[in-house]
Amino acid sequence: MALFYLFVFLAIIQCAYALYFFVRVFSIPSFDSAQDDKPKTPVKDRQPVSIIICAKNEAANLKENLPIILSQRYGNDPDSHKDGGALYEVIVVNDASEDNTAQVLMEMEQWYGNLWDVVVPRDATRALKGKKHALSKGVEAASYDWLVLIDADCVPASHRWLEKMVAPLASGKQIVAGYGGYHTGGGLLNAFVQWETMHTFLQYSAYACAGMPYMAVGRNMACTRAAFRQAVASPAWNALPSGDDDLLVSIVGNKDNTAIVCDREAFTTTTSKTTWADWRKQKQRHLSTGKYYKPGIKFLLGLYGASHAGLWLCFFVCLFLSHPLSAIIIMCVRCIVYWFFWAVMAGKLGRKNIIYFFPFFDIGWMVYNFAFFPYITHKDEKNWK
């Protein structure tokens, strides 16, 4: 009987969490690209932008993706996409690459007048750990105060990506968190990556809409130089070699200065890991930052993860020991609530293909939290690549 009451209590927590946070999926601004032809930022309000890419052995990705990044239509003329009229520069920080990244950049700089590279030698003295050192060098070299961050292996969804990502900066925001998705592929791993990425975006978008921003993804975000400098000045900034995206939002973000962009033309996309081992290593790095969030955020995220895992464990036990029919009804109500909000978010992101996997990945996320618990709570990943 006590176990059943615990199950009911956890179900209440889960539903209350979803109805407070996930219901804000309807507040996350999104746009129909087919009907959204007007520039998001009036030409008169546009400021020049520095796009910063930290690259370590990324020659192939740079060769493929840089031309798209450098073809953004963001200039004095809203239809201009040539470097002569561009209001942006692209700075690639070559962080001690051992492939032909330097050669690729040298060749491309002959074609693009707004492309620059910054080299970090292998034997350089690093004031900051990992990617943060490379990123700081990129910001130092940046000519402009509006900064947009994207990874070398990411491709913008459209030639209006830059315009839409910096639009909130023109209205006074300091941080803009966008969506960085993954190419759709075959297999269970790709499907789970699609779901987990959607779930993460729903989480941090809902928190931002609730006035509690705590993270973004460095493969698609924007900020002001002032916000970046404020984050670097924090003692927490250099705790990890990665996590610059989450830490910047956690340190600087608040209900007034952070915006979410959920516009399909403003998405970036990359290729997901193809093996579970590679994906596990990547997630260890991503999840290491969570322990440096603000205490209130850590409590709420911990409550969500713990109540989720506890609910499913109690449910399976109740099926055999205590009030199975009541447990099934309660769990059905909880799942309807969650899967409805997830389906709305999947629709906004154009990821409806994963809706059929919701029952499996809902349970799978319980396993996910148990598997990565050490990195969520105390362990740190030491490398950014």
Image: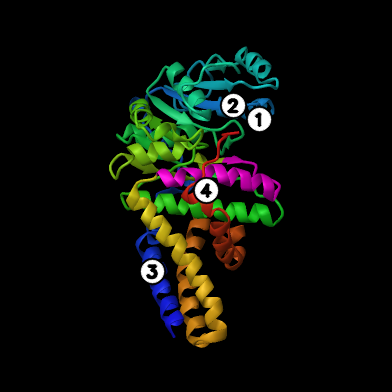
Give the residue type at disc 1: Asn
Q: Earlier in the sequence, mark 1 or mark 4?
A: 1
Judged from this view, the residue extending furthest toward the left is 256
Q: Find residue 188 and name its label.
A: none
Residue 55 at what x, y percent from top left?
59, 26
Identify the residue under disc 2: 55
Q: Secondary structure at mark 1?
A: helix
Q: Is residue 196 visible?
A: yes
Give the residue type at disc 3: Ile
| Pointer 4 with pointer 3, Cβ within 8 A | no
Identify the residue under disc 1: 61
Please identify the quarter of the rendering in which residue 97 is found.
top right
Q: Find residue 375 and name its label.
A: 4
Q: Secondary structure at mark 2?
A: strand
Identify the residue under disc 3: 13
Question: Residue at 35% across / 38% down in the picture?
Answer: 251
Q: Earlier in the sequence, mark 2 or mark 3?
A: 3
Stretch in magenta: 269-292
Q: Nearer the viewer, mark 1 or mark 4?
A: 4
| Pointer 2 with pointer 1, Cβ within 8 A | yes
Q: CA distance from mark 4 to mark 3?
A: 24 Å
Q: Nearer the viewer, mark 2 or mark 3?
A: 3
Residue 345 at what x, y percent from top left?
48, 57
